[in-house]
Image (spheres, helix red, strand yellow):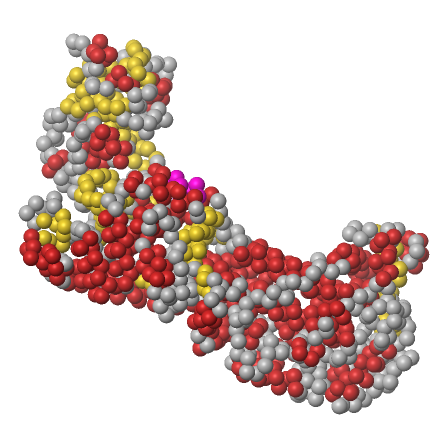
Amino acid sequence: MAIVATQMKSTFFMSLLLAIALERKVATSFQLSPVQRLARHAASRSSFYSSSVLLAKGGKGGDAKPPKNIYADTIVLPQTDFNQRANALQREPELQNYWSSTNLYSKLSAAAAARSAERFVLHDGPPYANGDLHIGHALNKLLKDFINRHQILKGKQVHYVPGWDCHGLPIELKVLQTMKSSERQALTPITLREKAAAYAKEAVEKQSKSFQRYGVIGDFDNPYLTLLPEYEAAQIRVFGEMYKQGYIFRGRKPVHWSPSSRTALAEAELEYPEGHVSKSIYVALDVVSPSEELKAFVTGDEKLKVAIWTTTPWTIPANLAVAINPDLEYCVVDAHASVLDGKSKLLVGRELVNTLESKFELPEGEKLNILATFPGSSLVGTTYQHPLYERTSPVIAGGDYITTESGTGLVHTAPGHGQEDYLTGLKNGLELLSPVDDEGKFTVDAGSSTVVGDDFVGKSVLGEGNIAVIEALEKAGALIRAEDYGHKYPYDWRTKKPTIFRATDQWFASVEGFRADALKAVDEVQWIPDVGKNRINSFIESRGDWCISRQRSWGVPIPVFYDKETGGTVVLLDEDTLNHIESIFAEHGSDAWWKMDVIDLLPEKYKSEADKWIKGTDTMDVWFDSGSSWAGVVKERAEKEMGLSFPADIYLEGSDQHRGWFQSSLLTSVAANKGQAPYKAVLTHGFVLDEKGFKMSKSLGNVVNPLSVIEGGNNKKEEPAYGADVLRLWVASVDYAGDVRVGSNIIKQTFESYRKLRNTARYLIGNLADYDPEKDAVPYEDLPSMDKWMLGTMSQVLNEVDDAYSTYQFSRVSNELLRFSTADLSNFYLDVAKDRLYISAVNDARRRSCQTVLHALLVGFAKAVAPILPHMAEDIWQNLPFKSCDDDSSVFEGGYSKDLMSYPAFDTEKWNLVRDVRTDVNQVLEVARQDKLVGASLDAGVYVYTSDENVRKVLAELDGDESLITPTVKTNGVDELRTALMISQVKLVDSEDEVTSSCDAAYTMKGELSGCMIGVKKAEGTKCGRCWFYDKEVGKHARYGADLCQRCDTAIFSWEEKSGAKFSAPSLAEAPVA
């Protein structure tokens, strides 16, 4: 490929001159509006011939020096206002203003609706209305935009409603951080809510502008916010439907509790950071009443103790049982001098004895002596004395969560502080003891210890309280060992601090009531990638009751009234109250819960009882908020004929949302919609890492700001402004199914790819400056083979790209477009096309046939890149030289062209062979070029021999006239080796000897791809001063110059006819050396 690129540069030095001229020309035209540019195109076409040339080769404007090549005025070089540089800081906002001024989104939606086009709904998962956007937001929103724009071009009715999650603790904390202590103390719930709403709305406005700067298309004038009255009313409706079906209940259960936030948390609100270390302890509990099998080991002064292990020492005060696995084997080990007082036998799991010998640090060579073994079921009924309190507790049967992977095989059970503990306690009628308050401190229920009295009260269970329990156990003689233990532990995802399990009165959604329906709904959804189905199934299968209440003010209230006399034991919550609250929220928003009196919040039938009730203060889990968006947005707007349809076609978010939004949306929809999933398909992406694969963090200095990629940093040399399309191309180039990487080097590489695509478009536009499809198009049946091959190749590429878009394989799209632009176009078709585009007479059939193909390529290319690179595509479209002045259409109007995607493959094997021969020839040329035998490829002649008759037959069909003549005799002037190889002379010979005898051995070789024997030598004849081909007939048939071939002489005559100008022929002495 490098060889080909070198050949291209050498072959047409005029391209460099062209670039210099165009850079100066576009500087002023780039500021024009789309309409002004269209008018300018029209003027350019009308003055094309009168101005003699599009751009003189090497020309630099009116006061420039005369061009070196005297024939430059007769050479038809590209002309366009489409800049080689994107100038994205200026141009992209101009294009976005054009979309806005033409109301493009609404226009496209209305046009599709008028056609009764199929609806396509990608429902937006709401980002949190807090802070600036990061690169992960960009990845997510741009993937969505690729899909939506592709569906628009497919003719679908696309309605994309961006959304924001506006409730919850992070916003509440942000508001509190801006206030003084005295202000916080005087804060009321309604004042806090007003400040939080203002903060959220400000963040939404800022984030919305950023998303639009990324080039995201959607209904940004009518987004959905979870704080809007109509949304909150819909959320109450979902809650009500679930309550009426018996799925919502209030109970006291252990839940994840955040002392730092002072609220309950859902599983999706937790994170498990690396490096957490807990203090684990081994504790011995004195057996008071042994089971029948253990009685032999509790006699006289001999003590038997139950050995337990825990990583949460602070839960020991709440211990009410020890659980065993009935199916495991347990044993009694004899007393050992190194364990406790050396006089106590221990009851432990049989398979853990060896591990415990190590943990208890027995002297080398010593063992724990096993006295007897028992099945776990035989231990049930044993009771033991709590080491810190005057109470005895039982040994009970637990479940298969009790294993021999760690610990002692006997599990400390505190029903108020663990899910398995709670369920085991429920089966065995244990009390729900949880002596910890909202701040995570021990309450008086943890007092009255026989060892330390009330010393625990008021101490933090995650700090000094934990240490105090360990010290008390050691004082009581019950502590066998304490050690550090590294493991995964749940943290509050907002405060980044540890959480605890704590029994509190909360509202729950009973997933068990509709688990089977949820799993069935999962089977009916397409999960992309497939592993997503396994992930969400595992979460749903293992999910317990969903705690949906939060002890915060900023959120949607749980619409329940509590009886004053019973302290909340009796509640008022039924269809009447739910419907009434829904109607109030729809009109006034959920602030009404705090602003209105109870009597106004109650329906008519209960107003007389208003004094009996008080309003609840809990708000709903934010996952219930966002999980209700299918009701508040998709279904709501579908029923109101606002362009949406339910269920949504697709949800697209990060892979962490299988336990978050995907799951909460599925659960609420299935529960409230008789088993209906809210989506037909779910697509997930990974997370964004830096170039080295590290997680981004400010402390590491590896954070990539998407707006800095677009607009540049403070130092534009180090952090240039690449524009939104380069950011978008990066998103399109990565395999988003897993984690992706980004950094300055990756963005630079992406920019180079972007430039290749843009330069391809610029070439196509520039060479169509004088082309009118209505007048100049050549019918397909009259096109040369090469042009038909190109159209067939283009259709294959467009269909490949369409399929990749449809299956969300955007890296396949970008790879295919780059490959096509580089390999098929730049390195071959467009390279060899320069001769007929620049050198031929303006109306020469071979030139117009090439322009016919370029027209198709340009339209197809613009449409193909449009979903990924909308700014470039729109810039192309507004610079189409053949658009009429009154055509203000966008590239996104009209959709994909079925005709462009329907050209058949044509002579594929022939042109594959030619390209193989071309690659082999270029390898030999490179050697000759290095040895200074030739410079440009046109300085060479090539000898070719093949023993393969089929290959020879194909090549013979492409063997052109000996000299450059018009009209051609042997070929059509396009389908011939001379132009395809960009070689002055190509000779097909009958033997290898003819190749080796005609060319120096250093410049002969057998082609690796074509299998042909190839030789290169200096071209014969004289170099034409206009086209630079060597030909023996140069100067013999010339009217305009002594250094012209017959073909160029005829082209100048045609130029005179078209332009009305006269070319002044120089003498041979005056003519510059080409």
Q: Which residue is drawn at 65% across and 69% down?
A: 856
Q: Specify the quadrant that holds the N terminus.
A: bottom right
Count of marks placed on residues: 0
Q: Which is the main secondary structure of the residues drawn in magenta?
A: helix
Give, as a single range, the part of the protein colored magenta: 533-540
Residue lying at 76% horizontally and 82% vertically, measured from the top left? 74
Image: 361 above or below 137: above
Vertical relation: 1047 (above or below) 383: below
How far across and down, in percent of the image, does residue 840 sit? 78, 76
**Residue 534 is a magenta residue:** yes
Split into 4 quadrants, where in the image is the C terminus?
bottom right
Q: Position of residue 542 (x, y in %)?
A: 34, 38
Residue drawn at (34%, 45%) of the image: 271
| Left or right of residue 533, residue 594 in this image | left
Is 134 positioned to the left or the right of 894 in the image?
left
**Residue 125 vertical placement versus 475 (above, below):** below
Whether residue 647 is visible: yes
**Whether residue 861 is visible:** no
Name the image quarter holding residue 122.
Answer: bottom left
Q: Residue drawn at (28%, 14%), measured in percent from left and top?
A: 332
Q: Nearer the viewer, residue 197 or 644?
A: 644
Q: Where is residue 927 in the image (x, y as percent from the top left)?
A: 80, 58
Residue 58, compared with residue 689, is above or below; it is: below
**Camera-nearest residue between 77 and 430:** 430
